[in-house]
Amino acid sequence: MNSLHFATGLGAGLGAGALIGIERQWRQRMAGLRTNTLVATGSALFVLLSSSFGSGDPSRVAAQVVSGIGFLGAGVIMRDGLNVSGINTAATLWCSAAVGSLAGAGLTGYALTGAAAIVAVNTAVRGLAQRLDRQPGSGDEVPTPYHVEAVVAARDEAHVRTLLVQSLSGSDSRLHAVTSTGQGESRVRIRAEITSDGADSTPVESAVARISMEPAVVSAAWRTV
């Protein structure tokens, strides 16, 4: 490997990563311009390092890059209640590593083409996905909002709130808010706002039935909004 080969591979990795990162930075994602550029550049450097040894196998280094990028991907995936965010950012970092590996292997054109494809997916396909969410193909998939209310003994409020959240965690429902208001000195009213995909109220009914079994629960009910 000569200096020209090294400079070409490094420059292609840096440029392709920056191309992906500009789109991510513009959308103010957790992994933006610097992160994607560094991931692609680092991947290119690792593959170039492997290529510098005559008996080395660049494919083995590329395989280790794919495994190692999983640590970065896991760091940007976050859970908030029943919602998970950051999966697309993690997938973009994974693709940036692939682009950098292509550049390090000397496939500059393929690396730049791959970067352009990734940007296209994150822009054009993003709009299509949002339109599909707003216009589901079947009425069975229309989101249905629910309210769940329970009157409980004040001393057991925290336990019942936790139980309600846990009862909904394994379903397709999305929990938006849980609030508590006093009902005298000894009782508390817990209200949960939930959205479920489709008209099937079974998950909500199951959650209400579960908390109703608690001795501290005076009453529990649910309704559609």
Image (cartoon, rainbow, N blue to C red):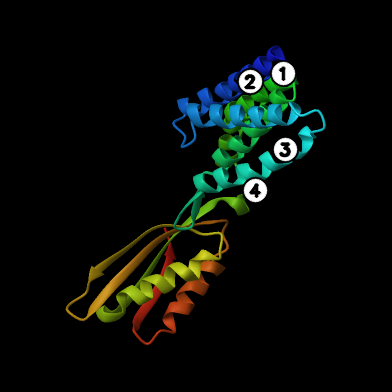
Q: CA–CA distance between discs 4 and 2?
A: 49 Å
Q: Tag count in the figure?
A: 4
Residue 136 visible? The answer is no
- State whether residue 19 is above or below residue 95: above
Q: CA–CA distance between discs 1 and 4?
A: 44 Å
N-terminal-most mark, 3 or 4: 3
Q: Which of marks 2 and 1 is in front?
A: 2
Question: Horizontal placement of 50 versus 131: left or right?
Answer: right
- Secondary structure, mark 4, is loop
The residue that mark 1 highlights is 108
N-terminal-most mark, 4 or 2: 2
Q: CA–CA distance between discs 2 and 3?
A: 16 Å
Mark 1 nearby-residue class (10 Å; few <14, some 14–19, many ≥20): many
**Residue 59 picture quarter:** top right
- Secondary structure, mark 2, is helix
The residue that mark 4 highlights is 138
Residue kind at label 1, given as amino acid type: Thr
The residue that mark 3 highlights is 61
